[in-house]
Image: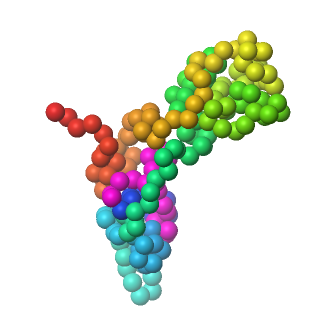
């Protein structure tokens, strides 16, 4: 029970985030329920007990107040990898996120910023080879110029959900934005 997580939906019953998926620990979900900040949508078949009460652990909750989502996605390592298709932007090698690093196109030591427009996914060998140079100086052209993605682009680049790893109560809420079959 300790590793159970609760899917958090906005007041419109869509996940707050897909990248990464908006999850809380079940304890945080209980706290929000008791503070009347969320509505219980679905529960696990597991109970949490106190000396005086027994309650089912929440699997899905919805915020009572709508949270306006930022227009642009958060600048995170995972979102950089997602934008770049989990591929090194110098050699094209596709790797799991644990095998990637990120590289500043214009090195920070030369005034390069940590921003969407200056950071790309890179494999370790290419990152070491490029070192403290620009791609032109290192003769390592970029496969794609770095740019700020939209939330929509990242959502559609998200690896397909493996619904076996999610609780069945989550599935109705994870596919609202997917295309319907005709």
Question: Main SS of the magenta segment?
Answer: loop
Q: Is residue 107 above or below residue 172?
A: above
In which quadrant will I find the N terminus? bottom left
Residue 112: tell me if it is visible.
Answer: yes
Q: Residue at x 35, y 70 (%)?
A: 39
> Is 151 positioned to the left or the right of 177 in the image?
right
Q: Nearer the viewer, residue 159 or 62?
A: 62
Q: How is the image coloured?
A: rainbow
Q: Residue at x 38, y 69 (%)?
A: 64
In which quadrant will I find the C terminus? top left
Residue 54 screen position, x and y as percent: 37, 79
Q: Nearer the viewer, residue 55 or 77?
A: 77
Residue 118 screen position, x and y as percent: 67, 31
Q: Nearer the viewer, residue 162 or 178?
A: 178
Q: Residue at x 35, y 54 (%)?
A: 14
Magenta region: which residues? 12-28
Q: Residue furthest right?
A: 109
**Is residue 24 a member of the stretch shown in magenta?**
yes
Quadrant of residue 103 within the rendered picture: top right
Residue 70 screen position, x and y as percent: 50, 50
Q: Residue furthest left?
A: 182
Q: Is residue 101 above or below residue 46?
A: above
> Is 78 positioned to the left or the right of 18 in the image?
right
Q: Residue at x 79, y 22 (%)?
A: 133
Q: Nearer the viewer, residue 55 or 12?
A: 12
């Amino acid at each position: 029970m300790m590793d159970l997580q609760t899917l958090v939906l906005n007041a419109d019953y869509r996940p707050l985030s897909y990248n990464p998926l908006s999850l809380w620990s079940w304890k945080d979900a209980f706290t929000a329920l008791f503070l009347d900040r969320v509505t219980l949508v679905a529960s696990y078949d597991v109970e949490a007990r106190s000396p005086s009460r027994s309650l089912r652990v929440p699997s899905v909750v919805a915020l009572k107040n709508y949270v306006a989502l930022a227009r642009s996605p958060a600048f995170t390592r995972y979102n950089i990898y997602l934008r770049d298709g989990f591929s090194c932007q110098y050699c094209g090698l596709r790797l799991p996120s644990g095998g990637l690093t990120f590289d500043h196109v214009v090195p920070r030591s030369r005034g390069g910023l940590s921003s969407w427009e200056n950071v790309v996914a890179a494999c370790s060998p290419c990152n070491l080879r490029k070192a403290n140079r620009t791609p032109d100086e290192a003769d390592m052209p970029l496969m794609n110029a770095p740019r700020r993605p939209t939330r929509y682009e990242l959502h559609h680049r998200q690896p397909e959900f493996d619904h076996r790893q999610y609780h069945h109560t989550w599935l109705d809420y994870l596919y609202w934005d997917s295309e319907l079959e005709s």
